[in-house]
Amino acid sequence: MEKAKKAQMDKFKRLLESKRARIVSDVERLKLQTLRHSQKDAAGDLSSYSYHMADAGSDAAERETMLDLASTQQKLLEKINKSLERIEQGVYGTCELCGGAIDAARLEALPEATVCIKCMNKYNL
């Protein structure tokens, strides 16, 4: 691999690893906030009295939102890991659909991208 291309791949690898670390941290924080607390803990109610059903509904909706967010972050993490694998395989920056180059500006903005803009628009991705 030529020196300039290797430097560029190292740059994208660092971007992806940094993004992965942030997401892992975010997902762990979300898990702690939603999965490891009982409904009473989440509501701040430490007494043995039950609380209003509307509070339970609000808590459940908030937990569901947090779990959806964690799921979205997990999918992004999978894309990042796939992009890191593509760097190791020497195919990072190549569109999975047409085989053309993915523009460097696109990879700067979205380093986990695996398709070029043309294919993204053509296939409504």
Image: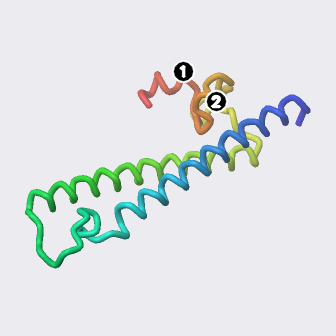
Which quarter of the rendered picture does the N terminus lie within?
top right
In this view, the residue farthest toward the front is 47
Q: Is residue 35 left or right of residue 73?
A: left
Relative image position of residue 100 (x, y in whole percent): 66, 26
Q: Amino acid at mark 1?
A: Lys
Q: Is residue 109 above or below residue 31?
A: above
Q: Is residue 52 left or right of residue 103?
A: left
The mark lying in front, picked from 2 and 1, is 2
**In terms of sequence position, does the residue under pointer 2 or pointer 1 come before the other?**
2
In this view, the residue farthest toward the bottom is 48
Q: Is residue 116 left or right of residue 53?
A: right
Q: Quadrant of residue 12?
A: top right
Circle 1 sits in a helix, a strand or a loop, which is it?
helix
Q: Which residue is mark 2?
A: 107
Q: Which residue is mark 1?
A: 118
Q: Is residue 3 above or below residue 53?
A: above
In this view, the residue farthest toward the left is 53
* Mark 2 Cα-neighbour bin, 10 Å: few <14, some 14–19, many ≥20: some
Residue shown at the point (44%, 28%) measured from the top left? 123
Q: Is residue 37 left or right of residue 96?
A: left
Relative image position of residue 121 (x, y in whole percent): 46, 22
Circle 2 sits in a helix, a strand or a loop, which is it?
helix
Residue shown at the point (18%, 54%) measured from the top left? 58
Which quarter of the rendered picture does the C terminus lie within?
top left
